[in-house]
Amino acid sequence: MERDIMQSGRPRLVVICVPLAAQSLDISGPLDCFLEANQAAQAPVYEIRLIAVDGRMQVRVGGMTLLMDATFADLAEEIDTLLIAGTPDYAGAAEFPAFADWLRRQAGTVRRLGSVCTGAFFLAAAGLLGGRRATTHWQHVAELALWCPEAEIRPDAIYIEDSGVYTSAGVTAGIDLALRLIEEDLGHEVAMRVARRLVVFLKRPGGQSQFSAHLAAQTAQESRIAGVQKWILENVAADLSVTTLARRIGMSPRNFARLFLTETGTTPAAFVEHVRVDAMRRALEDSDMPLKTIAAQCGFSGPDIARRAFLRRVKTTPAEYREHFCRSGPLGPEVSSSLNPQITDKLKGACGVADPG
């Protein structure tokens, strides 16, 4: 793919669809990634256009007014990658039938179709998520599942690809998704240069999870507990028993366990398991090491225990996870698409407007 794009001699058209009151970072994050990719590749690989979901030429977004490049009805060029930004007004996604019709037509011709955050509701409204795995911001996964019961909505993923349709979690996850698309097109080195330029991770420390242990470790206010969490993250294969951890900060195991629960909302054992499963995620994504080796490196006493912990936390087996998310392997099985019925007023009423994704 990298050779094809670089030798084609023409930019690939990336279109970002802008809903009313869109989350500004859902637009600017991916847009800047693609622009930086042009710089990193030293070639005009991507051309980016903004279009409005409602056909306007100006859209108010996050305190700014953005001028669109065209309307979707007037966009005649061949689109390579089509993304839909998220909005706190996602409950009205079904109120744009002309845009939904256009999306359905584009779904048959574009190379890649995707969404950032609550942009997934526009894909659902167009009937493009049925029979697929998908995700959105963790606060809105239950509503998306209600809108699209034929889809398998994954609440914990940063992004998911299924049969050429990409969905991502909230806000900054649009950057993760764009970096993945750039890596697919131009390779790991170019994607890494873009990530370094933007001062972001090419792959987050928590792997594909919206609920990584690194985020959980930022909740403690008590410095001793925060210090222990940091040490756990840096020493995942060490003895992480309550007795050992309590000894590190000069507390009794009982008082340590009580303070840890108060500060973090979870027990030391649950946090350790969370950290070790996150470490397994990253190893499964980035290597082809056997599970026995990964389990040992992540502090589990054996592969069976590791497998059970992974299934408990991630709701899938290590083998299935590797199949979907390993960088060098397939992104997942082909799943045939089926169109959903038009979302009813009853469903729209059940999905109230929430905080922006």
Image (cartoon, rainbow, N blue to C red):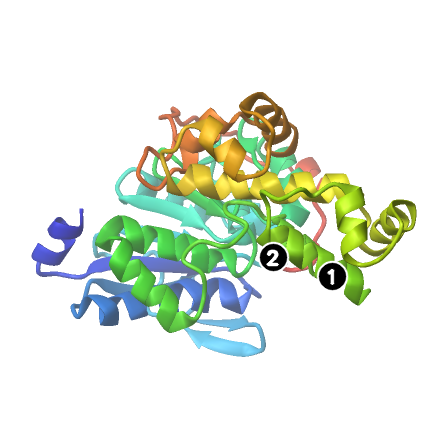
Whether residue 219 appears in this view of the structure is no
Whether residue 292 appears in this view of the structure is yes
Callout 1 amino acid: Ala
Give how far apart the Cα atoms at labels 2 and 1 are: 28 Å
Tell me which numbered mark, 2 or 1, is placed earlier along the sequence.
1
Query: Quick one: label 2, few (<14), some, or many (20+) residues within 10 Å?
Result: many
Picture residue at 57% right of the left edge, 66% below the top: 21
Against 28, residue 250 (above or below) is: above
Q: Any mark on residue 27, and which?
A: none
Image check: 325 left or right of 242? Answer: left
How many numbered dots are placed on residues in this image?
Answer: 2
Against 221, residue 166 (above or below) is: above
Q: Any mark on residue 226, and which?
A: 1
Q: Nearer the viewer, mark 2 or mark 1?
A: 1
Compare residues 295 and 13 and report the one nearer the observer. 295
Callout 2 amino acid: Gly
Residue 166 at x, y percent in the picture? 41, 43
Compare residues 109 and 221 and report the one nearer the observer. 221
Against 31, residue 123 (above or below) is: above
- Quadrant of the image for the C terminus? bottom right
Picture residue at 76% right of the left edge, 55% below the top: 248
The residue that mark 2 highlights is 357
